[in-house]
Image (cartoon, rainbow, N blue to C red):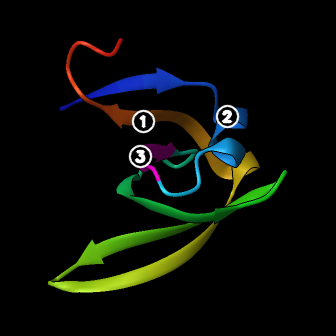
């Protein structure tokens, strides 16, 4: 498995996918996109063995990458 960079705007089409995002403040998060709209995503992130769902505005995300099987690039 590897992460492939995608445009932040493509996160809206990534429901059900595992992603890595870097927020504008430099904080990196990884998790599964539960739902997405034109301006925000619901990201399920595992923290201390507990799943937490966060709402992240796309405008607050600096970069994004989606997990793919190696060889699918």
Q: Secondary structure at mark 3?
A: strand
Q: Secondary structure at mark 1?
A: strand
- Quadrant assignment, res 35: bottom right
Looking at the picture, tell me which residue is in the foreground, 18 or 63.
Answer: 18
Instruction: Please tell me which of labels 2 and 3 falls first in the chain.
Output: 2
User: Given contact means CB atoms under 8 Å apart, are the residues at marks 1 and 2 in contact?
Assistant: yes
From which residue to which does the magenta span run? Answer: 17-22
Look at 20% across and 20% down and name the residue there: 70
Label 3 crowd (10 A; few <14 / some 14-19 / many >=20) = many
Look at 40% across and 83% down and name the residue there: 52
Give the CA distance from mark 1 to mark 3.
Answer: 4 Å
- Residue 20 lies in the magenta stretch: yes
The relative height of residue 45 versus residue 13 in the rendered view (above or below) is: below
Label 2 crowd (10 A; few <14 / some 14-19 / many >=20) = some
Residue indicated by mark 3: 19
Residue indicated by mark 1: 66
Residue indicated by mark 2: 10
**Residue 66 screen position, x and y as percent:** 42, 36
The relative height of residue 13 versus residue 2 in the rendered view (above or below) is: below
Left or right, residue 27 beside residue 64:
left
- Residue 5 lies in the magenta stretch: no
């Amino acid at each position: 498995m590897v992460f492939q960079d995608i445009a932040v705007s493509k996160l809206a089409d990534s429901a059900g996918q595992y992603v890595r995002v870097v927020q504008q403040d430099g904080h990196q998060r990884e998790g599964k996109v539960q739902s997405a709209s034109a301006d925000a995503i619901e990201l399920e992130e595992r923290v201390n063995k507990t799943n937490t769902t966060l709402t992240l505005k796309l405008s607050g995300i600096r970069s994004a990458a989606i997990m793919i099987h190696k060889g699918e690039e």
